[in-house]
Image (cartoon, rainbow, N blue to C red):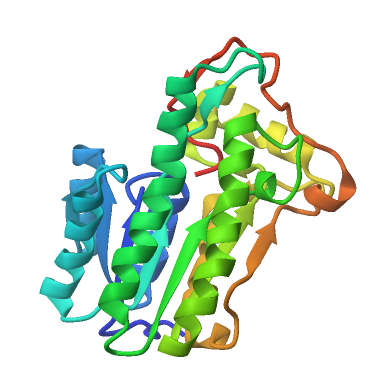
Amino acid sequence: MSNQFHGKSAVITGGANGIGEATARLLASRGAHVVIADLNDDRGTALADELGGAYVRTDVTREQDVEAAVAQAMHRCGRLDVMVNSAGVLGAIGSITEIRAEDWTRTVQIMLDGVFFGVKHASRAMKDRRSGSIISLSSVAGTKGGMGPHCYTAVKHAVVGLTRSAASELSPLGIRINAIGPGVTVTPLIDHLRGGREAAIEAAVAASPLGTACEASEIAATIVFLASDEACHITGQIIVVDSGLSVAGQAPPAHHSAPAGFASSSLPQ
């Protein structure tokens, strides 16, 4: 298991923080060459240096940036085996009657267009070898209403729809594509939103039917499983990792009553 990705390459958008960072670390620990695609130059460069990978400054709303990140993996390794579309923000918040169109559009550009670009260019790189795994971050909010802000919820549902639709085209090419739906996950950004790690853990425990706090590394473990040969028959699926939140009916605050605006902090990435 420790070297199951030896000789393989992976691109992780949003790879400098949170779930993306945890995924990059786990893939690298199992032998993969990782390309960190992010806008945080300092963290991205430091992480890539630490892991022996590469950092590519990437704005996922710009198709050429995502294409360049994939090209970096192809240049370094001659192949792309894993694409993780992890970049995201909380985005447009507030009542449906007050959300600004520009905030809505910006959220869709980051969280849906960015995933589309990742799927498009990863599958182009993978199709000649007739193998590869693409994993996109959806959310428990992508499975039902009331789990997050309106635009966030709409986009996360769309990520699931794109995953299922793309699987119908990519499966005959040997490319697997899946989505993962985290619930409340403790990440550095959630620490910041909650006012510290202890408060973030308490909030995660309170929202969890299992009474446990889910860490970014635990979401990363599921992503890496989906990228591995052990998941060779899994495609077109959303794997929900939410401690039972979506079936227990206990939802975190939905942000509907918050003042309308754009929140750059990610949830749960």
> In terms of image quadrants, where is residue 55?
bottom left
- Tell me where residue 93 appears, x and y as whole percent: 57, 22
Residue 78, relative to residue 120: is it above or below? below
Number of disc labels: 0
Q: Is residue 239 left or right of residue 197?
A: right
Q: Nearer the viewer, residue 49 or 57?
A: 57
Near-viewer residue (19 or 75): 75
**Residue 94 in view in this figure:** yes
Relative height, residue 115 to residue 267 (above, below): below
Residue drawn at the location 76% of the way across and 53% of the way down = 243
Among all residues in the image, which is located at the extreme right? 248
Could you say where residue 195 lies in the image, as x and y percent from the top left? 55, 20
Q: Residue at x 45, y 79 (%)?
A: 170
Q: Residue 251: x percent and y percent?
A: 79, 36
Rendered residue at 56%/32% (across/down): 197
In the picture as drawn, the residue positioned furthest to the top comes out as 259
* Residue 218 appears in the figure: no
Q: Is residue 212 left or right of residue 171?
A: right
Q: Residue furthest left?
A: 75
Q: Quadrant of residue 7?
A: bottom left
- Residue drawn at point x = 48 percent, y = 21 percent: 101
